[in-house]
Image (cartoon, rainbow, N blue to C red):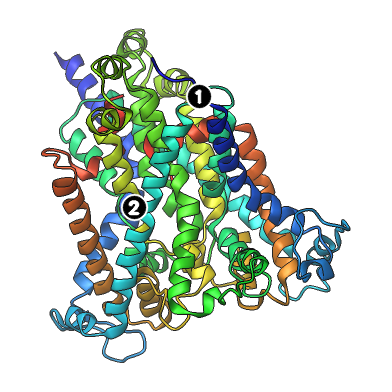
Amino acid sequence: MIRKPGIIVYIIATVIAFVFLWPVLYTIFSSLKTMSELRAAVPTFLPQEWTFEHFFDIWDRGSWRRGNLARYIYNTFYVAVLSTLLAVLINTMSGYALAKFRFKGDTVILLIILATIMLPLEVIMVPISRVIRFFRIYNTHWALIIPPAATPAGIFLMRQFLLKIPDDLIECARIDGASEWRIFLTIIVPNAKPAIATIAIFSFMWRWNDYIWPLIAISDSNLYTLQLHISTFGGEYRTNWANMLATSTISMIPMLIVFLIFQRQFVQGTVETGMKG
Amino acid sequence: MEKSRLAYFKKRLMVVTFLAPALIVLFIVVFYPIIYAVYRSFFNWSLLSVDQSTFIGLQNYITALNTPAFLESMRVTLLYSAGTTVPSIALGFALALVLNKVKKGKAIIRSMLLIPMMMAPVVVGLTWRVFFFDSYFGIINYVLSLVGISGPSWLSQGPTAVFAIIILSIWVWFPFSLLVLEAALSKLPKPPFEAAVIDGATPWQCFWKITIPMLQSPLIFVFLLRITTDFRNFDIVHVMTMGGPGRATQLMSLYTFFQGMRAYRLGYANALGVIMMIVLGIICFVIVRFVFKEKHSDKSQGGGLWADEQ
């Protein structure tokens, strides 16, 4: 009884998809255009004349007063990787505790954790900046690594996933005399791989794209992440338009690669917990 | 007996060990700052004045409510949130209904839809500023010029700047509603629809009488997540307009940021944060209670409610 999808449905779907892909491609292609072409009155999609000059320009330390691009890339990788490792570890641990142990107040703890999904960081940025200073991690990368590591959405995702692992599996191991840590490492972690992958991907993406945490926690430009660095183009984009595009392209490439490999987890994670930055 | 008690304590200890790292971080980064923000919002606390800790009661709140800039930011925030949330969900829902009909290539389309969400807000804000809204280079004005209209300089006039950030936010966020609602749609049972069609129901009736009621939970989920994100939006707007021109796009989050992190009026900024939390709480409450008429849904469960029902 349900009508067959017409060709129109496919056309609409293709148009939608293109609308989303277009700005990304346009950014990348524009970063390969010459300056005169960027300033042309009639914009084209593909470069008429392909050039990598802007990439050489931003890479070359001498001609570039803002500092070393390699350093910003390194900073961003460092922060994203360490924070992701930490996030995976502590979110898996607490997700396991909330899924497989019954104790007083377990639902209360879960509800409190979930309530923080709704809580805007922007609302508490002043106290957070004081907390960061109190722990003496202001203006260090630790301020970007540790505080965002415990993600309520990640804990929740892990809990939901681990609920599906049969209790018997854990109980058997206990009877066989396995220690709790051993159970965690040899039964829970291998079985939780899909959830771990999702948390890792999202965590990496959040830290890679993050703007507000570095803005609050970092003031030394040597410690800047790529995003903070790109935002400094904001004030003078007309003169440095080409460099801004080239740097943006460089910052998008790792995310695009991660995305192409893990598309399925991205869709799944977004749909299941509303995972978002 | 002894042994089982020992096992019991061992288990207890494990729970604490497993939960501790995440809870400690959340406590330090979220719970403590909230309490501290509320407490400090009653103080005259500024890094630029000598007097750092006089208890002044509700004075910061009274000041906020009498400050035109704040009231303006509240107005802009509400306009922006409503202007982004409602259309992005409506558009997402409409396209979810379309995508639900697609059989081949759905996975690719879904992946592409995620691209705006996985792009860095800084990059999105800056590239849109140049590619779309720039009065000289912008595509929008180029297209308008083709039909003989000379476009406005979008980001240098109040109303068009607000319009610009709304359009950009819809572009970034409607795929989220689309994906969640499409996933929910594809899991709906077929029989009610088949029965309705046999009884002669029009597609329009099917939609309002069957689809909408059955999608109640995912709709609430999407609505709450969207409104909380839009209401506190910061990065894209900060990069794209810096709150300008003038104060035209100065959302509450930006105003709070400028007061606290730039003007160092910390007590005042804390009060602003508390006001934001209260307003957001009221909005969520109203949505859950009155718009969806759901009696027992706890907003704090967010995705939980929905995910449990899968």
* Mark 1, residue position: A5
Looking at the image, is A270 positioned above or below residue A164?
Answer: below
Q: Nearer the viewer, mark 2 or mark 1?
A: 1
The amino acid at mark 2 is Val
Left or right: B90 in relation to A60? left
Residue at image x 58%, y 73%? B151
The numbered dot on residue B86 is 2
Which quadrant, please, contains the N terminus of chain B?
Answer: top left
* Parent chain of label 1: A
Number of other residues with Cα within 10 Å of mark 1, as a class: few under 14, some 14 to 19, many 20 or more:
some
Is residue B35 something one can see in this rendering?
Answer: yes
Q: Is residue B224 left or right of residue A62?
A: left
Q: Is residue A70 left or right of residue B51?
A: right
Residue type indicated by callout 1: Pro
Residue occupying image coordinates x 52% and y 80%: B156
Task: Indicate left or right for A135 with B268 as reference.
Answer: right
Q: Residue furthest bottom?
A: B50
Query: Residue B107 in the image: x percent, y percent?
Result: 56, 28
At horizontal 30% and vertical 75% (from top left) the residue drawn is: B269
In front of the other: B61 or B22: B61
Percent coordinates x, y for residue A19 in the rendering: 59, 47
Quadrant of res B4: top left
Q: Position of residue B218 (x, y in %)?
A: 30, 36
